Amino acid sequence: MSDQRADDLPDDGRDDGRDEPDVRRRLLEEAARLLGEEGPSALSTRRLAREAGTSTMAVYTHFGGMPALVREIVAEGFRRLVDRVAAVPVTDDPVRDLTAVATAYREHARADPQIYAVMFGSASLGGYRLHDEELDVGLAAFGQLVDVVRRGMDAGRLRRDDPADVAGQFWSALHGYVSLELSGFHLVVEDPETQLLWPMLAHLLEGLSDDAHRSGR
């Protein structure tokens, strides 16, 4: 997708958002919403500026153009996830901490569903492409989960294995539920949180536990 369509060209620069502390956030939020609701074809600087209540020049002032803005949506989403998970208190029970991390992850997705959709490809990026920098921020979020899993193994609560492999299993299960929840398909049961999410993660952790390994379960 070209960033130089006629309606994408910068305007006269009035109200470019230099002095508005929240204009950058508004542009990110509106771009994520448009991607999630209408796809990449909805992303022109003129449309985005109108939705965000600013000028087209603000897109160039804050991001340098639409491709960089789309990449920043992904990076910003993962930064918010990293911050939310980092705020989870570390206790002497790493398995309980894994549950707390899952709660933080779910809260992140529910707080920013459009950005979450872009982060994981549920909303198409169209002709826009991610760079290694955005993917590195995503790996940092995964690294937080790996660290908690490693603590569980070191404490003897989880059987010794590759922490990244186990973290990948946990994240896959959690992400699957959260994606279903955001799309509405989790409503196949009356109380999906208590009937699906927590039992699923508990069964996974039970299967990964060191006790289960020693008993041959």
Image (cartoon, rainbow, N blue to C red):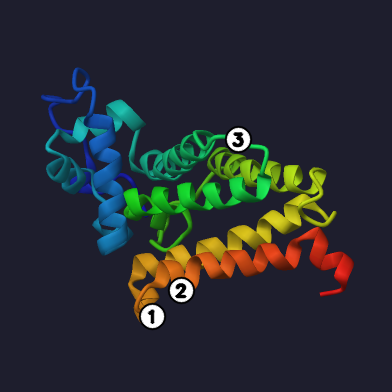
Residue 107 vs 83, above or below: the answer is below
Mark 1 residue crowding within 10 angstroms, few (<14) / some (14–19) / many (20+)? few
Residue 48 vs 187, above or below: the answer is above
Q: Marks 2/1: CA distance? A: 7 Å
Residue labelled with disc 2: 195
Residue closest to the far top = 19
Amino acid type shown at disc 1: Val
Q: Residue at x 11, y 24 (%)?
A: 14
> Which circle's residue, 2 or 3, is located before the other in the chain?
3
Cβ atoms under marks 2 and 1 closer than 8 Å = yes
Residue labelled with disc 3: 90
* Label number found at residue 189: 1
Residue closest to the far bottom = 188
Q: Nearer the viewer, residue 34 or 137?
A: 137
Amino acid type shown at disc 3: Val
List x then y, in percent, for residue 102.
Answer: 52, 53
Q: Nearer the viewer, residue 75 or 208?
A: 208
Q: Residue at x 46, y 38 (%)?
A: 84
Q: Is residue 183 left or right of residue 202?
A: left
* Label number found at residue 216: none
